[in-house]
Amino acid sequence: MRLSTRGRYGVRAMIDMAVHYTQGPSLLREIAERLQVSSKYLDHLITSLKTAGLVRNIRCAHGGYILAKHPKDIRLTEIIQALEGSIAPVDCVDDPQICNQADVCAAHDLWVQMKDSICSVLESLTLADMAQRQKEKGDYNPSMCGV
Amino acid sequence: MRLSTRGRYGVRAMIDMAVHYTQGPSLLREIAERLQVSSKYLDHLITSLKTAGLVRNIRCAHGGYILAKHPKDIRLTEIIQALEGSIAPVDCVDDPQICNQADVCAAHDLWVQMKDSICSVLESLTLADMAQRQKEKGDYNPSMCGV
DNA sequence: ATGAAAACTATTATTTTAGTAGAATAATAA
DNA sequence: TTATTATTCTACTAAAATAATAGTTTTCAT
């Protein structure tokens, strides 16, 4: 049940963009620098976020990335979904037809419960909440973050 | 956030043993057969379950495996933990010291919330609950299960 | 026009996952 | 006691996913 670096870096990047939302777009390079992450790798992740309509870009000299919507209108569910594909721990949750025993399988119910519990957390939080939390916590220095 | 086959097969095996609890030990081969899973692979998983003290074995002709405790005394948390190592989506949840910014990181709080929500589901369920669910659902034919 | 940035495409090393194979060991029952 | 049948242990491996890197192409504000 681990989140891959896609999910981790991606969420951190989105929080970073939410924190800097009022200051206009950030260069990919700047975001990667603040996160202490390879900008070439973040390039891939931000493409997924763009495809999902969560970030906008300005593609030219002095361009960069900015959230496509106000932080309060972006829920964590959308972010994780864009990056990891699905929140379900097992495929049969999203698509019960792949297993013709799903309706008589006790384990299936458990997988559904697990997904629902995670979803309810992610659905209850917006990027605005995350940005505020981050600001309350004060001087976060991401360049010293090891994860 | 996918559960690997370790978690999936292992939980299904434990439910299977809970359903057959009153009938005494089952052969590894029988469990694997009912789950439609490689018995050689299940061998590895059941070793983890044994190490965690969740199953007992009888090692001889007509031996087999049986739950080490009554199904009502085994929570799903223990099973997933034995099989997957940890329930935390990110390492810094279980061990905040690996990241010296964990206490000022908004993402960290999110990872904690995610873990807690899954844990509360798994902690609220016992194998007895799962076995009963399975019995209520009726004639489950695991040999037709594709997941 | 041009320069700085995003965007795209391809490749790769590493790690994890999911399994297989076979020999060693244990305990019961004949 | 010995044969039988099962678990247990150790080693190996193929395939997939992960986590990047590299280089080229496209875009557009200035």
Image (tube, coloured by chain):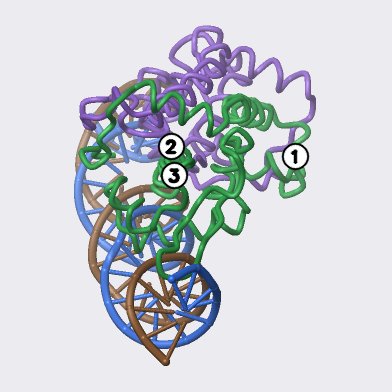
Chain colours: A green, B purple, C brown, D blue
Q: Nearer the viewer, residue A68 or B76?
A: A68
What residue would you read off at disc 2? Answer: A19
Q: Marks 2 and 1, Cα distance to the nearest angstrom?
A: 46 Å
Residue drawn at x 63%, y 45% is A91
State the separation of the CA atoms marked 2 and 3: 9 Å
Dot 2: chain letter: A
Residue C25 x/y as whole percent: 22, 33
Find out whether the residues at labels 2 and 3 contact each other: C-beta distance under 8 Å: no
Q: Which residue is mark 1?
A: A101
Q: Earlier in the sequence, mark 2 or mark 1?
A: 2
Which residue is rendered at x = 47% and y = 22% of the image? B113
Lower position in the chain sequence, tag 1 or tag 3: 3
Dot 2 crowding, Cα within 10 Å, few <14, some 14–19, many 20+: some
Chain assignment, label 1: A
Using the image, tell me which numbered label, if any, was put on residue A24.
none
**What kind of residue is marked 2?**
Val
Q: Quadrant of residue B124?
A: top right
> Which quadrant would residue B37 be assigned to in this image?
top right
Do callouts 2 and 1 mark residues in contact (Cβ within 8 Å)?
no
User: How many C-alpha atoms fall within 10 Å of the one at disc 1: few (<14), some, or many (≥20)?
Assistant: many
Check disc 3 and report the residue beneath it: A23
Q: Position of residue C8 (x, y in %)?
A: 52, 76
